[in-house]
Amino acid sequence: MQRNRIGAYLFSFPSFFLTMALGIYPVFWALRYMFYDYQGYGTPKFIGLENFARVMRDAEFWQSVANTFVYAGGKLIITLPLSLILAVILNRKLRGRHAFRAIFFLPTIFSASVMSIVFYIVFNSYNGIINQYLLKLNIVSGPVDWLGAAHAMLTIVIIAVWGAVGNYMLLFIAGLQSIPEDVYEAASLDGVNPAQRLWYITIPMLGPVLQMIVMLAITTSLKGYESIMVLTEGGPFGKTEVMYLYLYKLFFPLTTSGTSVQNIGYGSAVGFTTAVIVGLVTWLYFWMSKKLNNVY
Amino acid sequence: MTIRKMLIRMPVWIMLIVTAALMLFPIVIAMLGSFKTNLELTTGATVFPSKWQFQNYIDAWNKADFSGFTFNSLYVAVFVTVGTLLVSAMAAYAVDRVAFRGKKLFILLQSFTLFISIGAVVLKPQFNLMVSIGLHKSLWGVIIILISAHATAFFMIIGFFRGIPKDLDEAALIDGCNFYSTFWRIILPLLRPALAVVALFTFRNAWNEYILPLVFSLSRPDLQTLPVGLANLRYGAGAAVENQLMLAGACISILPLLVVYIFANRSFMQVTMGSVKG
């Protein structure tokens, strides 16, 4: 038994070491530097809460927070109902349901950045594929500026929905499979229609699973920035700048847009603030869904 | 089936087919477009290429250096997969089979890394650590950091351990195996189907990773992986942006996953569904 214990330490050590060095340490590193003035060179200077005062005043950052909520909200309002409906349909013994599931899930296996390049060619305002088809079919008179200031956010949301629906559909299917069949049988004897069945049986019965899936969806959509970075870099005029992209630019300024400069101390403070915002939203969601549960 | 029943089902089928078409649209566009000329791609408004340009793939492979990107992607993905499986399977074995001090703390640390996210902030200290051990100009910096993010794989494998009865370990012990040989000879072979699923998941994530190889290749363009090299084409190093090469490159990146997915999509989906069932 004694020897097993040594073995257990040996076997868990690589995992422990890597997690500490590259997972935990960076968090504490950031917790330290958020109190410093540090641009990446020279000696870091302790400035107390000055960085946080600057976060509060940083209009560009709060604009990116607002954009994040528009982006996440838009993505969730389309993704969640659509994926739930698809899940309900494909959870039944429908012919070809496995093929449909596989097709809907397909987008989730590809790299967000690679697909953003494809979407760039599809949505490109000047000579994109969608515009070519729309013009040829005489649906529009001039090219639609999909990635311009007016539509860029909408385009970003469409792409995000495309990449996410299959994932949440599958999570919902997994949840639906835990609902016993006889509940539905009883309901069908009572003459319940499909819409009522969804609203009065399926959604309440999903309960905690639904709560978990929605929470996962909220946090994931607040954190997403990879495809936006490839597609628009937050532009035009900061219209699609989300908070995690703003944060990235503080550490690794993008050479192509070149507006921001590296600022490690301030970046750490912004990182902390974004994490708090995500935490607050999660907490608020939990609080609200608990209230709703009490109503039932 | 009665006519009435068919009429009720019509909207459902229309919805399924329309959604499926929208899901497949960009992928089909990418594949067909990768065989068009740049001119046809940007002005043609055609569906199928008027003349199939297989040359695009040769140009992407040689001229745009997709051979190098593919090699780097493969290199990273293979070592990350092997490393992640080994590190998490060993840790899972220790945690599931032995009672040792600090076990609870260990599990807490793993879940902590899953839930706390401060975004790009962590990249800087991670990169600095790699500088201090001289791996910042190597793909191994990327590989080690990606292996360190193995909490998901760890929890997945722990889940599978429950399916292997502990009596088996004891039987192996009586037959002369010790803690280590039980792992290599008994547990790992039994875990093989589970490890295959985790490997698929890990390989896909490493193959698709964008931000980390981007940061590591900022000063070393020869370290670019497929997603990084491809995204850089968007701002064309030279004069004109060559859309047809971008689509050929995108297809080079997505085709391996697509082929695996066609044969093993149940395994891909199993990972996602497992996360809800717990």
Image: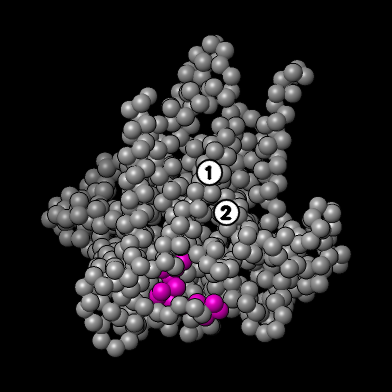
Q: Is residue B170 above or below residue B61?
A: above
Q: Residue A136 is drawn in which quadrant?
A: bottom right
Question: Residue B82: in sight, yes or no?
Answer: no
Kindly give the residue lying farthest to the top in the view shown. A189
Residue located 64% across and 30% down the image: A94
Q: Is residue A295 above or below residue A75?
A: above
Residue located 16% across and 55% down the image: B102
How would you rate the neighbour count of disc 2 (Cα within 10 Å): few for under 14, some for 14-19, many for 20 or more? many
The chain letter for the residue carrying disc 2 is A
How would you rate the neighbour count of disc 1 (Cα within 10 Å): few for under 14, some for 14-19, many for 20 or more? few
Cα separation, mark 1 vs mark 2, equals: 10 Å
**Magenta-colored stretch includes residue A5:** no
Q: Residue B134 is drawn in which quadrant?
A: bottom left
Q: Position of residue A93 (x, y in %)?
A: 61, 28
Q: Is residue A273 above or below residue A176?
A: below
Q: Position of residue B236 (x, y in %)?
A: 65, 79
Q: Position of residue A264 (x, y in %)?
A: 34, 76
Q: Which mark is residue B78?
A: none
Residue located 70% across and 33% down the image: B13
The chain letter for the residue carrying disc 1 is A
**Which of the two labelled residues, at mark 1 and mark 2, occupies the earlier sequence position?**
1
Q: Position of residue B244 (x, y in %)?
A: 73, 71
Residue located 35% across and 29% down the image: A293
Scheme by which the image is coloured? one colour
* Secondary element type, mark 2: helix
In what quadrant of the picture does the C terminus of chain A appear? top left
Q: Which residues are magenta?
A: A245-257
Mark 1 highlights which residue? Answer: A77
Kindly give the residue lying farthest to the left in the view shown. A2
Q: Which mark is residue A157?
A: 2
